[in-house]
Image (cartoon, rainbow, N blue to C red):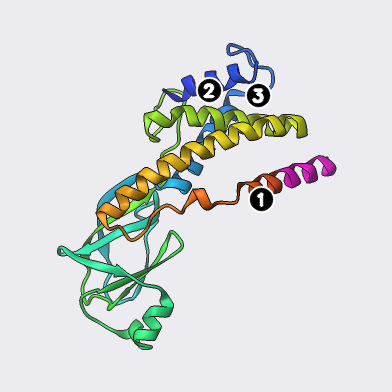
Amino acid sequence: MTGQDISDRIVARIDDSVSAPASCTAAEVLAAINEGQQFAALLTLFLEKTITFQIPAASPWFTTRSTVNDLFVPLKLTVGGTRIRPATLAELDALDTGWQASVGPPANYAAIGCNLFAVNPQPAAQTASQLTYAATPAAIAAGTTPQLPEAYHQSLVAYGKYRVRLKEGAQSLSRGLGDLNEFLDDMQKLGDFVRARSRAARYDMEPFELQRFDRARLIEEIVKSQAKKKAGA
C-alpha cells in the first residue's frame, strides 16, 4: 500500500469521508502514519543496512550521524573482515584506564546513543570499516510505499486510527486503545522474526522483548497525559 492507500483506510475506519474528511487533515493522517512506522522501527529494528564507514584517526571518539543520518543502533562492525566487539565504557575502563590514549587496530567499540562512538584502540590512520546497522525509515509521502514490510502495512492503519483519534478525548481514547494493542501485537510478531534473524547473524543488538513490556502501564500513562492536556485546555 502507498501512503495514500493507508490514509484512505484510516479515514474510512474513523467513519469520515475519504474524499473530504472533516475530523482530520491529510497532513495529520500522514504524520500519524509516519509516527507509526518510526515507532515500529524503534520496537523491532526491522530496517537493516550495511555501508562502508571511515573510522577517523588519532581519536578514540567520533560521531556518525553527520554522514550516516539514518543510523539508529549498530548491529555489527568489522575491519578487514575482523569483527570489532561491542563493549561499554565501564568495561573499557576496567580493562585499561588509559584506553583513550591507546593506538592500534580497533578491537572494541562502544556506542553511546545513536551518534557517539568510541573505539579501542584508536587507529593510527583513517580506517575503512563495514558497518551494519538498524536504520530509521524514510518519511512516507502520499505516493510512496512504507519501508515497513508489506505484511504489516495494515498495522500502520491501526496505529494511524488510534493516533488520529487521540485528540478527541477520553471516549475516543478508550476505543483507540484496541487499535494500539493491535499494532503492538503485530510489532511483537515482527520483533520475534527480527530477533531470530539477528541471532542467526550474531548481531550485537536485538529488539527488546515486547512480550515482557508492561502495556498496562503504557496505557495508563497515555490516559494520564490526555487528562492533563484536557485539564490544561
Q: How many marks?
A: 3
Alpha carbon of mark 2 to alpha carbon of mark 1: how far?
A: 29 Å
Alpha carbon of mark 1 to alpha carbon of mark 3: how far?
A: 28 Å
Q: Can you give x and y, in whole percent of width and height, for residue 221 in the image?
A: 70, 49
Q: Secondary structure at mark 2?
A: helix
Q: Are marks 2 and 3 in contact (CB under 8 Å)?
A: no
- Counting residues from the N terminus, which is met first, the one under dot 1 or under dot 3? 3
Residue type at mark 2 is Ser
Picture quadrant of residue 171: top right
Quadrant containing the N terminus is top left
Quadrant containing the C terminus is top right
The residue indicated by pointer 1 is 217
Alpha carbon of mark 2 to alpha carbon of mark 3: how far?
A: 11 Å
Q: Can you give x and y, in whole percent of width and height, for residue 120 in the image?
A: 30, 77
Task: Give the answer, above or below, for where 232 lies relative to 11.
Answer: below
The residue indicated by pointer 2 is 7
Residue type at mark 3 is Cys
The magenta stretch spans which residues? 223-233
Q: Residues within 10 Å of mark 3 (few under 14, many from 20)?
A: some
The residue indicated by pointer 3 is 24
Find the residue positioned furthest to the bottom: 97
Can residue 191 be found in the magenta stretch? Answer: no
Q: Residues within 10 Å of mark 2 (few under 14, many from 20)?
A: many
Find the residue positioned furthest to the front: 212
Inspect this view and state whether residue 49 appears: yes
The residue positioned 73% from the left and 46% from the top of the image is 225
